[in-house]
């Protein structure tokens, strides 16, 4: 279980990838800050779900199960860019040969998620 704090200034999604809308902030029964969130319906369904979640994305409403269930998380941010490929070689000649083997192309386009 991920117990990291939700960054409310970044995109949020349900644990299964569905879209989440933060409706408003409230005070939970325990006296801590909480948020009301709407989770979009799953594919083929008509209605979504509304939950009260704490600052870590776990349900904290009256009908929450005894074992904490994380409902939301920060959505992974997809990024892309160009990187230079470097390797460690014992000599300059070995490094130049490695780059020459790549026809001088030591830059590559990559995509990743954070």
Image (cartoon, helix red, strand yellow):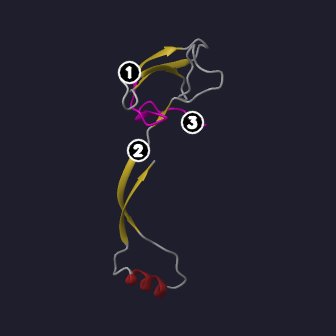
Q: Tag 2 or tag 3, which sits nearer the N-term?
A: 3
Q: Which residue is mark 3?
A: 4
Q: CA distance from mark 3 to mark 2?
A: 16 Å
Q: Magenta part of the protein: which range? A: 1-22
**Residue 62 location in percent, x, y?**
57, 13
Q: Which residue is mark 2?
A: 77
Label 3 neighbour load within 10 Å: few <14, some 14-19, many 20+? few
Residue at point 60%, 34% (across, down): 3
- Please name the predominant secondary structure of the magenta segment in the image: loop
When the figure is inspected, residue 69 is found, relative to residue 99, above or below; the finding is above
Residue at point 65%, 25% (across, down): 67
**Residue 46 location in percent, x, y?**
35, 23
Label 2 neighbour load within 10 Å: few <14, some 14-19, many 20+? few
Any magenta on residue 7?
yes
Q: Is residue 77 left or right of residue 88?
A: left
Q: Secondary structure at mark 3?
A: loop
Q: Which residue is mark 1?
A: 47
**Residue 74 location in percent, x, y?**
46, 36
């Amino acid at each position: 279980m991920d117990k990291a704090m939700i960054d409310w200034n970044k995109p949020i999604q349900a644990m299964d990838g569905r879209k989440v809308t933060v409706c408003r902030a409230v005070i939970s029964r325990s006296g801590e800050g909480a948020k009301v969130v709407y989770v979009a319906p799953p594919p083929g369904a008509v209605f979504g779900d509304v939950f009260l979640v704490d600052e870590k994305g776990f349900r904290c409403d009256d009908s929450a199960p005894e074992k904490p269930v994380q409902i939301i998380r920060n959505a992974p941010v997809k990024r892309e860019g160009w990187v230079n490929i470097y390797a460690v070689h014992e000599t300059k000649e070995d490094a130049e040969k490695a780059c020459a083997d790549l026809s001088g192309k030591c830059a590559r386009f990559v995509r990743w998620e954070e």
